[in-house]
Amino acid sequence: MGSVLYNFSGERFVVTGASSGMGRKVAEELAASGAMVLAIARRKERLQELKHEYPKHIITATIDVCDTKGMAEVISSFVASYGKINGAVHAAGIFSSTPLRNYDESEARKIMDISFWSGIRFIQLVNKKKNAMDGCSSILFSSVAATIGEKSNFAYSSAKLAIQGAVRSIAKEIYTRGNRINTVSPGWVNTELTRKEDESSLVNKKFYDWHLLGIGEPEDVTGMVLFLLSERARWITGTNIVVDGGYLLGGV
């Protein structure tokens, strides 16, 4: 079977949620393809590990994505040092169960703040003319939960659906400079976050069975992310790409 290799040499990207899971894998693959990457997350030690792996291509910033002022400062500093951004990926997010009869409102708001509102502020920052090259490509992580509405997960499902609606609207504002924006909706992917959910027995057997091609790995999703960041996707904007191993087909 053939393979796809990307060359992002001389280009610059910002990735949130870069300490683990799909955000980390995106940062790794961009760095391996020659890009300069600003990797943002809250866990300093995990970012340092990433920096150690790609010392010439990874710049780290330990910051909460909900810190708007701090995010503006680290992005501005990165641009001043390395040049305007070619693309950005918002992979930061959290997951926790929110059954209607017994949910923690503060936790539900936190889910929305990190997945949605911080994502919108991030996209606003990286698409400013002073920060972004013309043709900048932005990607936000949504989820198949936005389509199917997973039981007891209304906050997470709502946040991910809100992202898709926002992206369709924002695409109509940023196109004049050739800037693009899209969402990617993964199914269940084997990451640190999902392993914790497995251990808490919140995921039933049917959930696994409905992934016709099995449970995914981060690289099953990041290939699509790199494609959308690349010039080959220059005619794609305002849309949602599902990468779910057949989950939304509804089982067999």
Image (spheres, rainbow, N blue to C red):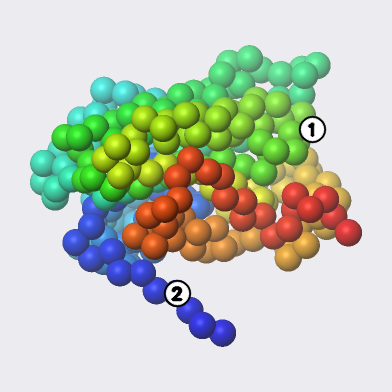
Tag 1: Cα neighbours inside 10 Å, few (<14), some, or many (≥20)? Answer: few
Which residue sits at x=66%, y=17%? 104
Question: Is residue 57 rendered to the left or right of residue 117?
Answer: left
Using the image, tell me which numbered label, if any, was put on residue 4.
Answer: 2
Which residue sits at x=71%, y=19%? 103
Tell me where residue 134 sits by quadrant: top left
Depth check, mark 1 against mark 2: the one in front is 2
CA gap, disc 1 to disc 2? 37 Å
Quadrant of the image for the N terminus?
bottom right
Q: Position of residue 247 (x, y in %)?
A: 75, 53
Tell me where residue 74 sits by quadrant: top left
- Residue type, mark 2 in image: Val
- Residue type, mark 1 in image: Lys
Q: Is residue 32 above or below residue 20?
A: below
Question: Is residue 26 rendered to the left or right of residue 136?
Answer: right
Q: Earlier in the sequence, mark 1 or mark 2?
A: 2
SS under mark 1? loop
Disc 1 target residue: 151
Q: Out of 241 and 144, give the one closest to the viewer.
A: 241
Tell me where residue 126 sits by quadrant: top left
Which residue sits at x=48%, y=34%? 167
Q: Residue furthest bottom?
A: 1
Which residue sits at x=70%, y=38%? 147
